[in-house]
Image (cartoon, rainbow, N blue to C red):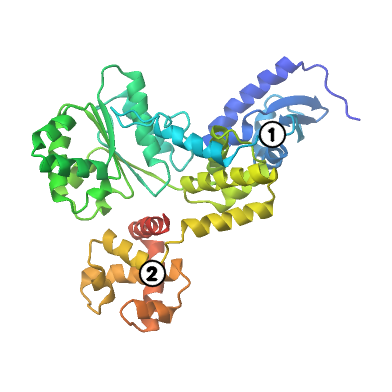
């Protein structure tokens, strides 16, 4: 049996481990550090081996596999004779707290009542419960900077990214932080659809001046999904004037969109220029470690505690969308509440059922309609034989996405796109596939279209 080094009291080991962790934190991503190093400790030194305490077998295996070299490198600054590391689980066995479907639904309903009618902000969205990773750390840092220097830094701030990646969370977190930090400040959050519908109602009631006054009186304006301003000429005019009024008075403006300003179709160039005049930052899909960290945070919010193995499978399978992560997690918790057990096979069934529900609307008609809307063209021109330049690219993308997102054969796709020969479909598919590798703007467009199509 190995002898424990008695010369190192626990206080000394804790001090050393704290310093080691502070060094490791600078080398790894924030979600990786939070996910894998929280609740770890330096337990003991046994000859040429150090023993690290971890909260679960899942963390143990992951640290051994991914981080042993980094840990060893920093520990050798304190123990030059150390050759190996060992890990031991020191926490109590995890149990799953029972959570019922009714409890989840009740919790969801309660969130509605957290919305402040004055600001339209939901208090649940905070910086503290936003999981930061390599995919969103610039957007997160910019959002925090906006709060610190209202109207003076990053004005406007323009955040773009795919569906369910956290844009709304960041906009609302900015608003909530400002309300908490400053007194007597007028913050207004709303979606672009809401902005447009309010404008229409005020015009109908012959109260346009009241509408202008309402928005010109705000100190911080946060508008979500600004890409829906496309084709809405009157709304663009009013927003342009509101923007100028607020900007000249150093009032903070923040927008979100599913695409950068350069790819928003059918908006005035002067407005596009305003969108681009501050800082533009994007949010990408989260990496594996960030997804695990998100699942752990969401699970804590729902008072659940699923096994790490289950979280790992969910994080591996659900890669693009934070909302989907939460959806699968919720279904898993409901399933567990019924069976008091959850196997890998059970989870595979949950994932299959979830995606059948989520993607049930992926039909050729849906794809055609979304592409027509995105490129602001009549769907009939996508399907007719016209070879006008403005229709060729959207039509090729349509054929590419029909092949990518459905089980249709090349001949069947050809029939649906104006009775074209299957060789034409094959050519279009291969052409777009190759261009995506070289053209980042096209790749971004395709990604945006996929997310819209796959979001029910």
How crowded pointer 1 is (Cα within 10 Å; few <14, some 14-19, many 20+) is rated as some
Q: CA distance from mark 2 to mark 1?
A: 54 Å
Query: Looking at the image, which residue is at 56% across and 41% down?
Result: 101
Q: Evaluate whether residue 131 shows in this view.
A: no
Badge 2 marks a residue whose secondary structure is helix
| Position of the C terminus by quadrant | bottom left
Asked if disc 2 and disc 1 are in contact, CB closer than 8 Å, the reply is no
How many numbered callouts?
Answer: 2
Name the residue tied to disc 1.
Answer: 72
For residue 118, above or below residue 195: above
Q: Nearer the viewer, residue 88 or 76?
A: 88
Residue 449: which quarter of the image? bottom left
Q: Which mark is residue 24?
A: none
Q: Nearer the viewer, residue 410 or 82?
A: 410
Tag 1 or tag 2, which sits nearer the N-term? 1
Q: Nearer the viewer, mark 2 or mark 1?
A: 2
Q: Evaluate whether residue 355 shows in this view.
A: yes
Compared across the picture, whether 29 is left or right of 428 comes to: right
Residue 435: which quarter of the image? bottom left
Query: Looking at the image, which residue is at 48% across and 72% down?
Result: 407
Residue 53 % position (x, y): 73, 29
Compared across the picture, whether 15 is left or right of 283 comes to: right
Residue 278 % position (x, y): 25, 37
Name the residue tied to disc 2.
Answer: 364
Residue 45 % position (x, y): 79, 25
């Amino acid at each position: 049996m190995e002898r424990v080094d008695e010369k190192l009291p626990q206080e000394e080991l804790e001090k050393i481990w704290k310093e080691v962790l502070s060094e490791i934190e600078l080398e790894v991503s924030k979600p990786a550090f939070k996910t894998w190093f929280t609740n770890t400790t330096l337990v003991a030194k046994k000859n040429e081996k150090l023993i690290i305490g971890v909260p679960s077998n899942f963390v143990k295996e992951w640290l051994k596999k991914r981080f042993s070299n980094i840990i060893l490198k920093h520990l050798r600054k304190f123990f030059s004779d150390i050759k190996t590391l060992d890990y031991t689980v020191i926490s109590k066995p995890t149990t799953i707290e029972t959570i019922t479907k009714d409890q989840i639904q009740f919790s969801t309903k309660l969130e509605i009542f957290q919305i402040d009618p004055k600001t339209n902000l939901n208090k649940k969205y905070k910086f503290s419960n936003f999981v930061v990773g390599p995919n969103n750390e610039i957007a997160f840092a910019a959002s925090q900077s906006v709060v610190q220097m209202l109207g003076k830094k990053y004005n406007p701030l323009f955040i773009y990214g795919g569906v369910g990646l956290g844009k709304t969370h960041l906009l609302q977190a900015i608003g909530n932080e400002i309300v908490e930090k400053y007194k007597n400040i007028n913050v207004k959050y709303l979606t672009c659809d809401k902005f447009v519908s309010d404008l229409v109602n005020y015009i109908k009631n012959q109260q346009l001046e009241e509408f202008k006054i309402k928005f010109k009186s705000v100190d911080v304006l946060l508008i979500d999904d600004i890409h829906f301003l496309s084709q809405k000429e009157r709304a663009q005019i009013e927003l342009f004037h509101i923007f100028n009024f607020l900007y000249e008075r150093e009032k903070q403006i923040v927008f979100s969109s599913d695409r950068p300003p350069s790819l928003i179709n059918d908006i005035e160039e002067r407005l596009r220029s305003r969108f681009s005049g501050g800082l533009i930052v994007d949010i990408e899909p989260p990496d594996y470690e960030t997804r695990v960290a998100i699942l752990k945070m969401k699970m804590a919010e729902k008072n659940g505690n699923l096994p790490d193995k289950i979280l790992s499978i969910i994080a591996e399978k659900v890669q693009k969308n934070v909302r989907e992560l939460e959806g699968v997690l919720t279904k898993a918790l409901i399933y567990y509440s019924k069976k008091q057990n959850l196997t890998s096979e059970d989870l595979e069934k949950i994932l299959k059922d979830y995606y059948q529900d989520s993607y049930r609307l992926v039909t050729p008609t849906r794809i055609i309609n979304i592409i027509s809307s995105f490129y602001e063209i009549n769907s009939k021109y996508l399907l007719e034989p016209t070879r006008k330049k403005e229709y060729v690219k959207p039509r090729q993308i349509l054929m590419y996405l029909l092949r990518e997102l459905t089980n249709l054969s090349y001949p069947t796709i050809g029939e649906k796109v104006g009775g074209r020969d299957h060789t034409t479909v094959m050519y279009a598919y291969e052409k777009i596939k190759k261009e995506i590798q070289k053209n980042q703007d096209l790749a971004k467009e395709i990604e945006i279209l996929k997310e819209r199509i796959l979001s029910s």
